[in-house]
Structures are given as C-alpha cells and as structure tokens.
Image: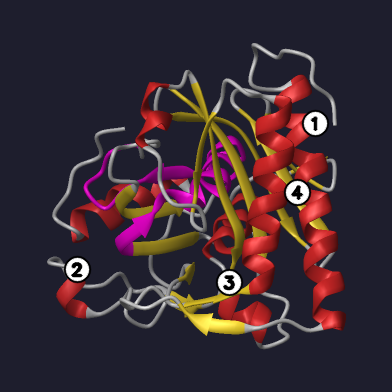
C-alpha cells in the first residue's frame, strides 16, 4: 500500500483507504464460501463473526503500518484513549451489518474513515456483496464507483422516502410527533447513509445512540449535498472519549429543519 505523507485528507490517504476497503471486501466474500463462526458479544452488543475480527486485524495492520502516527478506533478493537492525542485517527467498522452478513444477505459494508480535529476528512465504504464502492474527501465531493453522486433535493416532508428502523419512528422518540415519511429499511447504517448521498432516498433517521463507527458514510452523505446532524441539531463530532453520537440524521437539506423541530431541537450546524 502507498505510504507517502498526505496533508490534504485526499490523495494518498484516500487511495490507501480505498485499497484497504476493497481488500476487506474480498476477505468478506471469500470467507462466506469457506465458512465462519458467529457468537454474541454479550451485554446486548449484538453478534460478531470470525470475519469481523479477521478484517479488523487486516485493516489495523495495513493502515497503521502505512500511517504509524495516526490513531485507531474500531468496533472490534479494545479502545485505547491514546487515539485522543493523535492528529488524525482511523475510524473503522470491519463489517457494518453483521447479522445480514451472517445470514447470507447483501446489506453489509466495510466502513473506513479518517478524522482530524473531530471532523471526518476522508471516507470509503465498500459493499462487497454488491460490488459497490462509495468514497469522499472533505471539500472534494462524493462518488460511487468513481462517478459523482448527489443527494435528494426534496422539500416536502410528507411522503418522503426515509430509511429507519421501526423503533426509529416510534412516537415516544419524537416529541413533536414522528414525521409523515414512507419508511424503508436496510440492515447496514453505512449503506443507508450512502443511499441518501446517492439520492435514492430522501433521509436516513437514526435518533437513538449511534456508535462512531459510521463516521465514513456521514461524510459521504454530506459531501453529496445532504444535511447531516445528530438528534440535537449539531454537526456530528468524531473521535470523542466516549465514541457515541446522540443520533445520526442525513437528509435532503430542506427536510432537516422539520425533522429537528419534531425532535425538539434546533439546527446548530
């Protein structure tokens, strides 16, 4: 993998991430043929497979070898608060949508982000079973398989196509009442956010706790022109001591103010 220093957040760093995400996708596809073990993490954290851990090890070895001064934050690695002192930090989800992966479905992805001073500056999301790659750099736009993508320009909340879990639209989560959207679902939150960036859906609504592993698709959606906020109306900040966000919403820009009002929040972006 390339090891040239990159100070822009694009260029060599993004190329490194794309190469790593593709390699991770190849592992995920190959291991489906070979077979793997799956077990529950405990504490309600959901399932993990041997493949999650294998990909996590590969990504950490390759990315930190190429950038030894960058920090590391991953769903499948024990957290090291030394990352808080790093100028830049890799934020990784080896397999987002583990249940779907273990069930033989295509709704899973590999998510790799690079954060600096709380902002994601480069991102890659590989959807191995679909053969699709989304990527973005801060200020450089977002692309799917090399072609530029753009978010929806919808202005009417009523009937908007929104990706959300059935719990995400429960009335008790929306003080002003849940929005009158048409609900759709994909198991991978990373894929949901990329679909908003692609303009295939008008919004992705996750209003509960969200781990930072979904940093990469947040940048992809934003660079495609979507508005991205947490459930309190702020632009999400990454590489926190507790790597958890209060919700993660991406939508056509004109829809965001209405969603936030229904949550009892103001746009602080």
| Contact (Cβ within 8 Å) of mark 2 with mark 3 | no
Badge number at residue 174: 2
Q: Can you give x and y, in whole percent of width and height, for residue 96 in the image?
A: 58, 64
Dot 4 or dot 3: first in sequence order is 4
Q: Can you identify the residue that label 3 sits on?
A: 97
Secondary structure state at the residue bearing disc 3: loop
Dot 2 or dot 4: first in sequence order is 4
Asked if residue 80 lies left or right of residue 58, the reply is left
Which color scheme is applied? secondary structure
| Contact (Cβ within 8 Å) of mark 2 with mark 1 | no
When asked about the image quadrant of residue 269, the answer is top left
User: What residue lies at 41% left-to-right and 77% top-to-bottom?
Assistant: 165
Q: Nearer the viewer, mark 2 or mark 1?
A: 1
The span from disc 3 to disc 1 (Cα, nearest Å) is 24 Å
Q: Can you identify the residue that label 1 sits on?
A: 15
The span from disc 2 to disc 1 (Cα, nearest Å) is 40 Å
Magenta highlight range = 207-235
| Contact (Cβ within 8 Å) of mark 4 with mark 1 | no
């Amino acid at each position: 993998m390339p090891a040239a220093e990159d100070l822009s957040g694009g260029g060599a760093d993004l190329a490194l991430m794309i190469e790593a995400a593709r390699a991770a996708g190849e592992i995920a596809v190959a291991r489906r043929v070979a077979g793997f073990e799956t077990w529950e993490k405990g504490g309600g954290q959901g399932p993990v497979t041997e493949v999650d851990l294998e990909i996590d090890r590969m990504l950490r070895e390759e990315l930190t070898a190429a950038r030894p001064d960058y920090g590391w934050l991953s769903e499948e690695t024990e957290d090291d608060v030394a990352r808080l002192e790093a100028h830049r930090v890799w934020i990784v989800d080896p397999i987002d949508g583990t249940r779907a992966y273990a069930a033989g479905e295509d709704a899973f992805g590999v998510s790799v982000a690079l954060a600096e001073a709380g902002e994601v500056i480069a991102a890659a999301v590989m959807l191995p079973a679909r053969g699709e790659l989304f990527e973005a750099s801060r200020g450089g736009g977002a692309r799917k398989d090399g072609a530029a993508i753009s978010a929806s320009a919808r202005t009417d909340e009523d009937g908007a196509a929104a990706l959300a879990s059935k719990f995400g639209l429960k009335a008790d989560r929306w003080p002003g009442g849940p929005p009158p959207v048409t609900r759709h679902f994909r198991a991978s939150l990373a894929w949901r956010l990329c679909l908003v960036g692609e303009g295939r859906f008008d919004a992705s609504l996750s209003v509960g706790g969200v781990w930072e592993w979904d940093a990469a698709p947040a940048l992809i959606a934003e660079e495609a022109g979507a508005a991205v906020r947490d459930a309190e109306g702020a632009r999400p900040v990454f590489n926190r001591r507790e790597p958890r966000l209060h919700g993660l919403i991406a939508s056509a820009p004109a829809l965001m103010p209405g969603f936030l009002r229904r949550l009892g929040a103001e746009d602080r972006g």
